[in-house]
Image: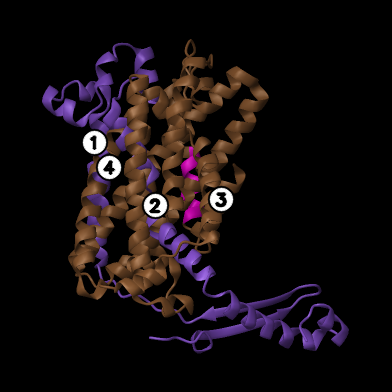
Chain colours: A purple, B brown
Amino acid sequence: MSHSLWTKVEEVGISFGSNVITVSIHLNSLKMAFAVSKQASYIVLYCVLSFFTFLAILSIPHVSKKVPEFIRSRLLIYGVKKVNDESTRRDYFLSARKAVGTAAVALSYFAASMGSWVLYVVSMSIASLIRSFILPKQLFVFFRLFLITVMEAQSSELTLRFLGLV
Amino acid sequence: MIGYSLGCAAPALLIMFLGPRIKQATEPEKVYSASDFTKLRYGRIMNVVSGGVALFNMFIFLTSELTSIGNIFSQMTSFWITSYRVSVTVSMGAFTIFYTALAGYPASMISDRIQAVSIILFIIMLLIATCVLPANKVTWKQFDKASNWTTGGLETAIIINIGLVSSALFDQSNWQRVYAADSDNSLRRGYFGGAILVFLVMMYFGILGMLGYAKDPAAYDSYYKYAYMSFFDTLEPLKNGWHIVVLLLACSLSASTIDTLQNAITSVFSHDFMRLRVTWDPLFIARFIVIAINVPAIYIATNDKLNILQLFAIGTLST
C-alpha cells in the first residue's frame, strides 16, 4: 500500500508578512473508526472515578479504623494505625509518613509514572524516530520546492544563489 | 524504545540511592518534598527557585494529563465535539480534586495500589487481544523495518534519559514516597520494583506502536496515518468490548497520575503552612491549594489548541 505525500495534501496556504513567510499544509489524514457509545463512555468514566473516590474515603483515618483488619491489610496502608492525635492526623494527611511498605512504593511509582499520555507519546516518539531515518530526503525536496516557489516571487536571483537554491 | 523505557525507569533507580541520603539529611525536621531539603540545605532563595520550577513542571504535566484523557475519550467514541471532551476533562478533574482534598496523600497511595493492579490486568488483556488478532499479524521483514539500531536512536535515547531524569527529580511525588516509605529497605526495593514495572510497560506500549507502524509504514511516512496514533491502529480491528477495556485502562492511568500530581503540588507548600501561626487549619489551606491550582489546569486543558507534546516539551525544558 503506497501513499504519495502530494495526493494527501488537503489544503496549502501561503501568507506573507513583513519579514516572515508562513506556509501551512493541511494533510488529509485517516480517521480511525472507534465506536464506543457516548453513554457507555460516561458509564466507564463515572464508575471508575466513583470507585477511586470510595477507596479514598476508606483511607480517611476514622473511616479506615472501622474497616475489618483483613480488608485493611490488603487494601490500605497500615500506617493509619499510628494516627492518634490532631498533629499526626495532619502529618498523615500530607505525607503518610513511614506508613507504606515495599509493594505500595513500587505500585505507587508505577501507577503515577504511567499517565494516559503513554498511549500517545510512546507511539509518537518511536514512530517519529523511525520516520526521521526514512524521510529526510523527501522532506528536503518538498520544502526546497516550496522555498523556490515562494522566494522566486520575493527575492533576487542572487539571494537564491546565496542560499544554494538554484 | 529501549532508551525511552530506560528513561522512564531511571529516575526510580536514582532515587533508590539519593532518597535515603536526603531523608537522613533532613531527619530531625518533618519535611514533605525535595524543595524543603533545598530550603534546609541552601536557604530560602534556592527553596523558592526549586519550588517554582517544580510547581511549573508539575502543573504542565497535570494539564497535559487532563488534555490527554479528553482526547482519548473523543478518539474511542469518535465523538469530536468540544463539549463532550470538556465534560470528560472536567469530570476527571472534579472527582480527583474531591477525593484528594478529602483524604490527602493516603488516598493517592491507596488508589495507586488498586490502579496499578488494574492497569497491569488491562494491559495483559489488551496484549493478548491485539497479538492474537489476524489483522495485527506482521512478517519478520515488516517488523525489521520498524525496529532498527541507529546512531540517531542512541542519541535520542541519551537526550530522553537526561530530560526525563531531570524532570522526574523535580516531580515532588517521587520525593513524597521517600518520606512515606516505612524504611530505607522498603524505599530501595519499592523503587527498584517500580522501575522494572515501568520499563516493561513502556516496552509494551512501544512494541505495540512499532507493530502499528510495521503494518503500514507507507501510510505513516506519508502522514496518511499520524505517528502518535500507531498504538490505536493496533486496537482498531478489535471488537467494541475491547475498546471499553481501553477506556477503563485510560481512566485508571489518568486518575492515578492526576491524584498523585495534585498531592505533590500541595507538598511544595506543606512544610511552610504547617508552621504558620494562623487560626486556619493547615489541612484547610492544603485543600484550598489543591482547588486553586487545579481549576486553572482544567481550564487550560479544555483549550482546543493545546498539543500534548508541546506541553511536555515546555515542562521538561523548565527542568
Nearer the observer, disc 2 or disc 1?
1
Mark 4 or 1: in front is 4
Q: Residues within 10 Å of mark 3 (few under 14, many from 20)?
A: some
Q: Chain of mark 1?
A: A
Q: CA distance from mark 4 to mark 3?
A: 28 Å
State which mark lies toward you, 2 or 3. Answer: 3
Pick the front one: B220 or B264: B220
Q: Secondary structure at mark 2?
A: helix
Q: Which residue is mark 4?
A: B116
Where is residue B220 drawn, in percent x and y? Answer: 44, 75
At label 4, counting other C-alpha atoms closer than 10 Å, the crowd grade (few under 14, some 14-19, many 20 or more) is many
Callout 3, which amino acid?
A: Ile
Question: Disc 4 vs disc 3: which is toward the camera?
Answer: 3
For residue B45, the mark is none
> Mark 2 sits on what residue?
B90
- Which residue does the image show at 69% across and 76% down from the upper left? A22
Type of amino acid at the residue the image marks with label 4: Ala
- Residue occupied by mark 3: B159
Q: CA distance from mark 2 to mark 1?
A: 20 Å
Query: Is B9 rendered above or below residue B269?
Result: below
Amino acid at pointer 2? Val
Marks 1 and 3: same chain? no
Q: Is residue A73 visible?
A: yes
The structure residue drawn at horizontal position 48% and vertical position 47%, both measured from the top left corner, is: B61
Categorize mark 1 by other alpha carbons within 10 Å: few (<14), some (14-19), many (20+). many
**Disc 1: which residue:** A55
Asked if labels 4 and 1 share a chain, the reply is no
Q: Residues within 10 Å of mark 2 (few under 14, many from 20)?
A: some
Q: Which residues are magenta?
A: B292-301
Chain letter of disc 2 in the image: B
